[in-house]
Image (cartoon, rainbow, N blue to C red):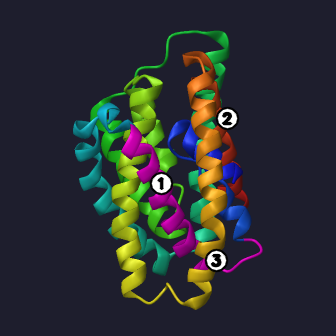
Amino acid sequence: MISFAIRGGIGFGAAALPLIALVLPMKLVVPVFTVLGIFSSWSIVFNESRHVEWRELLRLLPYTIVGALIGLYFYNAFDSRTLARGLGALVLAYGSSTLWQSLRQRPAWKWSPSLTLPVTGTLAGIVGTLFGAMAGVFYAIYLDMQKLDKHRFRATVAATLLVLGVVRGAGYLAVGAYDREALIATAISLPLMFVGVALGNRIHTNLSEIAFRRLLSIVLISSGVPLMLG
């Protein structure tokens, strides 16, 4: 519920998945979180579709698809724990730098869109394929650099995750991941997810722009820690 309250507040927030995976098998957690993510993203996009930056979404998707293919390769060829720690370090570094900038209220560092677009889009595909979540962290990095206001930011992250979730969910369905146990777990989790998103909507409404940026930074840092410990 806490994870999806964060998702409702800023558009993404699946940092809880690696922690849940410590006590539940990944083959159960991943498909369940995918369905919950689809529903939570849809609830945001349904109400905020006018704020979605469709151009940015379409620019991210090709790199995400490439990243997903790369993720499948690395999933078979390399140790996921080592890869998770490296990506976690990247997220921690960016989240810490943006939090530091927001606290000191200095101008944000300038990054080249021609570099950040392919890097973050590809990393989103890789991480989403490996872990079934966390792709939103990298979409957030790119969209935060575009300096979208909090409404457009949340709606665009949610819309991108919705499209990715549907594609990924279809893949899990094709390989038989949605067995009886997964369906029961999904049914039990759905009410908690909707409560979390409702709480997140209240958080989003009451946040100032500065507070929103700081919350975003904290979520990025919190997402990096489980990746490094995974």
Mark 2: few/some/many CA within 10 Å (<14, 14-19, 20+): some
Q: Position of residue 15 (x, y in %)?
A: 64, 53
Would residue 220 be seen by someone viewing this image from the given angle?
no
User: In the drawing, what numbered circle is on residue 135?
Assistant: 1
* Residue at figure coordinates x 47%, y 59% from the top left: 39
Q: Is residue 105 left or right of residue 144?
A: right
User: In the drawing, what numbered circle is on residue 185?
Assistant: 3
Residue occupied by mark 2: 218
* Residue at figure coordinates x 36%, y 65% from the top left: 166
Marks 1 and 2, Cα distance to the nearest angstrom?
Answer: 16 Å
Label located before the other in sequence (1 or 2): 1
Is residue 182 or residue 161 the one in the foreground? 182
Label located before the other in sequence (1 or 3): 1
Q: Secondary structure at mark 3?
A: helix
Instruction: Indicate the amino acid at tag 2.
Output: Ile
User: In the drawing, what numbered circle is on residue 201?
Assistant: none
Would residue 202 be seen by someone viewing this image from the given angle?
yes
Q: Is residue 44 magenta?
A: yes
Q: Nearer the viewer, mark 1 or mark 3?
A: 3
Marks 1 and 3, Cα distance to the nearest angstrom?
Answer: 22 Å
Residues shaded magenta: 22-47
Marks 3 and 2, Cα distance to the nearest angstrom?
Answer: 29 Å
